[in-house]
Amino acid sequence: MGPKPSQPQTAELFRPRLDEQINMKHPLLRLATLIDWAEIERTFAVSFTCGRGRPALSPRLIAGLLYLQHTFDASDEAVVNTWVENPYWQFFCGETYLQTEAPIDPSSLTRWRQRVGEEGVEALLAASIDAARRGGVIQKASVQQVIVDTTVMPKAIAHPTDSRLLDRSRQHLVKAAEDNGLRLRQNYNRVAPRLAAQIGRYAHAKQFKRMKKAVRTLRTRVGRVHREVQRQLHELPEAGRARVQDLLQRTGRILAQRTKDKNKLYALHAPEVECISKGKARTPYEFGVKVSIATTLKEGLVVGMRSMPGNPYDGHTLAETLEQVGILTGTDRPPATAIVDKGYQGVQIDGVRILRSGQKRGMTKTLKAMIKRRSAIEPAIGHMKMDGRLARNPLKGALGDALHAVMCGAGHNLRLILAALRLYCARIGLSVQAVVAALIAHSLNNRTAYG
């Protein structure tokens, strides 16, 4: 069945409408008029159609909740609870009358994100770019000059130490054995946590020989549990065998890996996490996924954003990023000029002029000014991490990385549009005050002149 029909019921005909109670000049409501909701509903039509069960929710409701979540840095629970309390959020999501109950359960947002998929969230990012163009935040030609850079989107995992990974693996194996009725000769529920705590104390005291010895002891204990569960794997039914086998495979990787190995497993529940070094003194290594970002040269609006699994070289991500920019901006071709840093050395793309930091050959005054402005993307990334949700990705799997990265870009665009609308309203208010003051002064002057 399709989405619920938006026809007012008999009881609602006698209720006051939201547009009669709230300030229709609020920046959030002005933003709602700039977004092409019809195009979003057309893109979401496939995900919101079902042949059985009750009617699906309104596409505008889900799109609005996702927009609000990443614009105001709210969790699934917070965005739904605030929606009930805030009539402006309700009107932004397409409601006509004030609602006093939550529209959905917060946990269902996870399922809606999976149904919408990467194509759906890219449609939301494209709609934010179109809204910025309609609101005058960017010009049509602004998308032809972009700044491209990469950053790390950290995953919501604990800091990966050998002792923690080993003990967590043992805990999951013991729990899987209990759930499936397997008998273990020893589960080390008392010995292993003590060893893990002692390893931390040795590391703090810089007693590294004792620490390594304790790690070897803990690895031996976890290996015994791993082998015992593996020997009894054939006793499990087909349904539970696959899950336990996947857990055994990940635990085997943790048991085999050493400090300087490559392609290590950094989280038992998130094997897609990578260790990325960005050369920062405060955080030498970050654990997450690389994200490529493209913003307009002058305004800093995000016109392209995509997760890049596998920690590729920055230059190898440029072509894919510029292709996405062309699709999202509606030009169907990459921008004419891309300004990048020295990490993109050696890459060339047909039809695109690439300007790099430190480039000196063939530079004019205009091109030098464009290269000098390349660092403008850095505060945009900082705002997405501090004001948005780019600093910590709570979604699961590679699909969660892709969805979260794109929505962080859409949330940044909406914050820029809202800031521009607030500035416009402030200027209008100041101009009105100036006119009123001039009229009052003119009236007082005339009254004085005529006695």
Image (spheres, rainbow, N blue to C red):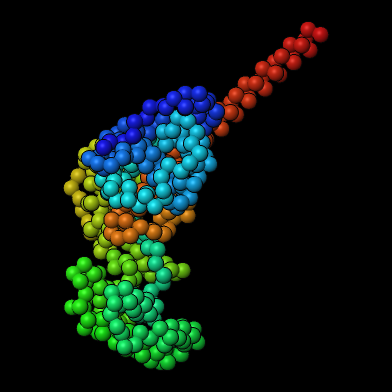
At 21% from the left edge and 53% from the top edge, which residue is drawn? 348
The residue shown at (54%, 30%) is 22
Residue projecting furthest to the front: 181
> In this rendering, does residue 250 appear at all?
no
Question: With respect to residue 4, does 379 lie above or below?
Answer: below
Quadrant of residue 325 in the image? top left
Relative placement, left or right, of 310 versus 136 is left
Of the pair 358 and 8, the residue shown nearer to us: 8
Towards the viewer: 181 or 24: 181
- How far from the left and from the top, in percent, is residue 130? 34, 35
In the image, residue 84 sits, relative to residue 163, either above or below, namely: above
The N terminus: image quadrant: top left
User: Which quadrant: the C terminus?
Assistant: top right
Residue 379 x, y percent position in the rendering: 45, 52
Residue 21 position in % (x across, y down): 55, 28
Q: Nearer the viewer, residue 401 or 90?
A: 90
- Residue 49 visible somewhere in the drawing: yes
Residue that sits furthest to the right in the current view: 451
User: Vertically, is 431 above or below 181?
Assistant: above
Look at 47% across and 30% down and name the residue there: 97
In this rendering, the count of numbered labels is: 0
x 38%, y 58%: residue: 393
Task: Please identify the quarter of the rendering in which residue 271 is found.
Answer: bottom left
Identify whether 241 is placed above or below 392: below
Q: Position of residue 65 (x, y in %)?
A: 41, 43
75 sits left or right of 113 in the view? right
Q: Nearer the viewer, residue 256 or 41?
A: 41
